[in-house]
Amino acid sequence: MSLHGKRKEIYKYDAPWTVYAMNWSVRPDKRFRLALGSFVEEYNNKVQLVGLEEESSEFVCRNTFDHPYPTTKIMWIPDTKGVYPDLLATSGDYLRIWRVSDTETRLECLLNNNKNSDFCAPLTSFDWNEVDPNLLGTSSIDTTCTIWGLETGQVLGRVNLVSGHVKTQLIAHDKEVYDIAFSRAGGGRDMFASVGADGSVRMFDLRHLEHSTIIYEDPQHHPLLRLCWNKQDPNYLATMAMDGMEVVILDVRVPCTPVARLNNHRACVNGIAWAPHSSCHICTAADDHQALIWDIQQMPRAIEDPILAYTAEGEINNVQWASTQPDWIAICYNNCLEILRV
């Protein structure tokens, strides 16, 4: 897309509702396409697919479809070559896979792991494996993570997250899992990590699900809400605590001791995004209206200040760094999406 001729640094889209979930499409033929999820505190919610029009250099809504409850996460299939169908996944009450065409978006399958119950345990997040797009992992408030194989929708492995020490062998201290993310380590297919209400970061291997490794525990046992792997160096990941104003950078080779703390935000952090093309840059976004880009290459020396700061017109709910267009970052606040050239 020939946006560089126009040299606009910021493009904005106003949605008809508060935007929470958001994700960049990675298909080579669909640049500047994003999916947005509404946050309306009722059953009826929406997903919009928006794209930047080359001629007008304005965002237009290409498609809107209904979604039960707000989407906790949206992700396009990580298919940078465009060889798979044009799929989109959403998490909420269940994991849903949608097929996108030029005219409509239709539900391809609904993945439900609660066959014996009338009630579902809501999904807090999910991740789509980049190496094997037939694998997805979900995290749930019922203390479990589930790995799904897309071709049949069956469960490949189920991991119960229990707190880090055993007092008695009762399932009494189980707590919610808030995020899950596959690691690029060891081939990129089998390793994943999760965070949750017990304040720990745990790492798993699909080949050895009988045990897990605790990489970090929050000193105050505050719940950890998000985790995000470095895209270029699989030794590093970032996490943040509920209502916390700092982002903690961890090195899996040095468990339980953060290698850096990024703490310039003045209100709680809501989003983390590593640069897709650099191992030492990360963007954080918070309720203080700020999106901050950090250069962490001097770790383990303290990282005092970000190298770039952008102030939005509202509390930033989410930040996404475009994996196939690394000079663009998307943020959302209130009912707005903005993409920023960095």
Image (cartoon, grey):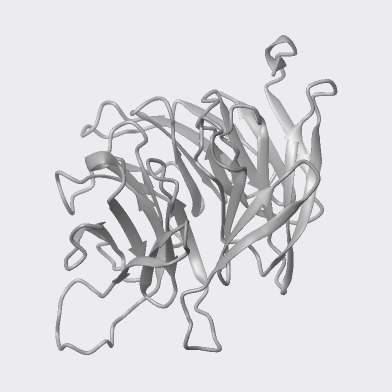
Query: Residue 20: percent from the left, percent from the top?
Result: 63, 55
Residue at image coords 55%, 43%: 319
Q: In the displayed image of the protein, which residue is found farthest to the right?
A: 56
Q: Quadrant of residue 160?
A: bottom left
x%, y% of residue 275? 44, 31
The answer to whether one can see residue 134 in this image is: yes
Foreground residue, 227 or 190? 190
- Depth check: give the residue in front, 8 or 326: 326
Q: Quadrant of residue 322?
A: top right
Q: Quadrant of the C terminus?
A: top right
Residue 119 is situated, as x and y percent measured from the top left of the image, at: 54, 86
Give residue 68's position: percent from left, percent from top. 69, 70
Q: Considering only vertical position in the picture, is 290 above or below 167?
A: above
At x 81% / y 29%, what residue is drawn? Answer: 58
> Could you tell whether 189 is left or right of 14 in the image?
left
Residue 262 located left or right of residue 12 = left
Closer to us: 99 or 184: 99
Quadrant location of the N terminus in the rendered image: top right
For residue 248, say whether it is visible.
no
